[in-house]
Image: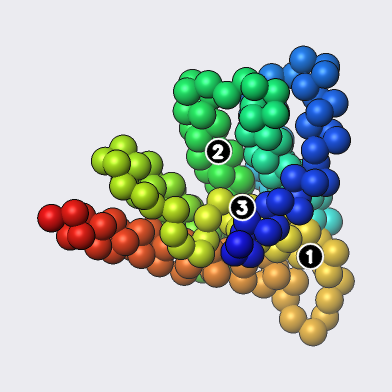
Amino acid sequence: MNYRDWLQQLIYKVINPAVRGMIRLGITPNFITTTGLVLNVVAAAVFIYAGLRRPGELAFVGWAGGIVLFAGLFDMMDGRVARLGGMTTTFGALYDSVLDRYSELFTLFGIFYYLILQGYVAGSIITFVALIGSLMVSYVRARAEGLGLDCKVGLMQRPERVVLTALGAIFCGVLRHCTLFDPMLILIAPLALIALLANWTAFYRIAHCRKQLKEKR
């Protein structure tokens, strides 16, 4: 069992009581998926509000990061509710994947716009490259699986991206009074890691698929 599977099982043990409660209440996976999207839109709005109305007040960045992390739980709970509640559908899988992409786009756009407003042009470019990598990681896998190939390899998958983005924003807010270095770097550094590893993962997946196709000849 790799670290992702171990961590996933640990999180499932934590959220299973809440999941079973949702099932008893009749809450559907699609409702949970939609709630996750709404929370990410709220997080993006907080980033934009902070940039427009509260420049320099990094506490808002921390709060936005907390919302992103909370929304990430819904990304896990929708699939768990579907499986434990016997509510898995093909449309639900499609709906979940599409809204996950929208969620990530809204979040990273909010950060991108916030950094532009604060004058961090290099940081905003890094965020945009992270956005490209995030989309391409998902696209390569979707395209590969549509061609009948297995493509779940790579380091920077969605859970890692969500956690890094959220923690970067949270600690940027928590350490906002730091004088040793610019606290904004705490937000930008994880995004730089995502930009690098997500795009690397996308190309690694392409190479992985190419290898599979060669072996099938």
**Which numbered disc flags the more N-terminal residue, 1 or 2?**
2
Q: Are marks 2 and 3 in contact (CB under 8 Å)?
A: no
Position of 57 compared to 204: left or right?
right
Of tags 1 and 2, which is closer to the observer? 2
Q: Amino acid at mark 3?
A: Pro
Q: Which mark is residue 159?
A: 3
Q: Which residue is mark 1?
A: 171
Q: Residue at x 80, y 24 (%)?
A: 22
Question: Visible in this render: residue 57?
Answer: no
Q: Residue at x 64, y 30 (%)?
A: 83
Disc 3 element: helix
Q: Amino acid at mark 1?
A: Phe
Of tags 1 and 3, which is closer to the observer? 3
Q: Quadrant of residue 24?
A: top right
Disc 1 element: helix
Q: Residues within 10 Å of mark 2 (few under 14, many from 20)?
A: many
| Residue at the extreme left of the image, as rendered | 217
